[in-house]
Image (cartoon, rainbow, N blue to C red):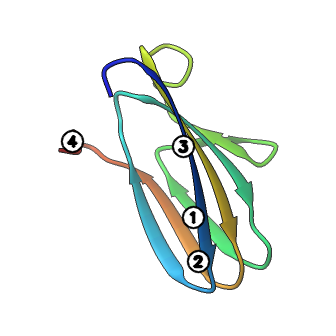
Amino acid sequence: MVGGYLNVTMDAGAADVTVRLPKHVGVRVVTDPGAAMFETHGLTQNEGVYTNAAYGVSNGTLQLSVQAGIGRVNLEVAEKSIV
C-alpha cells in the first residue's frame, strides 16, 4: 500500500492466530476480544485500540478490526517489509 486507507475485519473464532503487521504503514487495530488473550509486539495500546509508530504519520493506513472467541491473538509489527 503506497497511500490510502484499507479497512479489514478478521474473525479469529476459537483459534490461536498470529498477525504480522507492516512497520512503515500506519496501523490501527480495534479489538473485540471475547475470551481471547491478546499479545502485542511493537504496538501501543490506548483503551482497547492498538497503533504502531507509523500511525498518523504515514501516507497509508490499515485499520484492522479483530473479533476473537477463545484462543490467543498475537499482533506483531514486522521488522522488515512484508512482501
Crowdedness near tag 1: few (<14), some (14–19) or many (≥20) residues, C-alpha within 10 Å: few
* Residue under label 4: 80
In contact (CB < 8 Å): disc 1 and disc 3: no
49 to the left or right of 72: right
* Residue 24 percent coordinates (x, y): 34, 28
Compared to 16, does 25 lie above or below?
A: above
Mark 3 against mark 2, which lies toward the viewer? Answer: 2
Callout 4 secondary element: loop
* Residue under label 2: 72
* Residue under label 1: 39
- Kind of residue sitting beneath label 2: Arg
Residue drawn at x 49%, y 13% as measured from the top left? 57
Q: Which disc, if any, is residue 7?
A: none
Q: CA distance from mark 3 to mark 4?
A: 15 Å
4 to the left or right of 68: left
Q: Which disc, if any, is residue 43?
A: 3
